[in-house]
Amino acid sequence: MTVRLMRLIVMFDLPVAKKADRKRYQQFRTFLIKDGYSMMQFSVYTRITNGSDGIDKHMNRLRCNLPPKGNVRVLTVTEKQYESIWFLVGKPSVQEKTVGAQLQINL
């Protein structure tokens, strides 16, 4: 049985007006990094998983670490779909190059 590599893409918009909000934002961001996510863009983090079992495991971890306020969205795509990202401006990060994503650079 072949395991299909998948990507979780976590996008969030959290309040930072109050000191408590900034603390919760930092806690959520720290959780993502410790759980193996890397920053794709500001407030957009991505992680590779092994198939749907990995997706389920990490979705449960996310649910347990959600901030009380704000907006958090998750998109799941196959690694092949993720590799079809087009860069209109900018270049892949060192992390993306290390992981091996073959991202297209097109204008």
Image: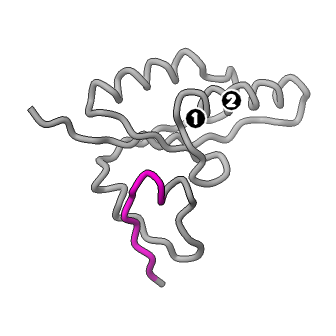
Residue 3: image quadrant is top left
- Residue at coordinates 76% horizontally, 30% vertically from top-left? 26
Q: Which mark is residue 100?
A: none
Depth check: give the residue in front, 94 or 89: 94
Dot 1: within a 10 Å radius of its alpha carbon, few (fewer than 14), some, or many (20 or more) residues?
some
Mark 1 and mark 2: span between their CA atoms? 15 Å
Give the image location of residue 22, x and y in percent.
83, 31
The residue positioned farthest toward the front in the image shown: 98
Quadrant in the picture for the N terminus: top left
Residue 50: quadrant of the picture: top left
Q: Is residue 6 left or right of residue 103?
A: left
Q: Amino acid at mark 1?
A: Val
The relative height of residue 26 versus residue 76 in the rendered view (above or below) is above
Instruction: Write down the residue under mark 1.
Output: 72
Q: For mark 2, what is the residue?
A: 30
Query: From the viewer's perspective, is 82 left or right of 88?
Result: left
Residue 6: percent from left, percent from top: 32, 41
Range of residues picked out in magenta: 97-106
- Give the crowd class for mark 2: few <14, some 14-19, many >=20 residues within 10 Å: few
Magenta-drawn stretch contains 19: no
Q: Quadrant of residue 27?
A: top right
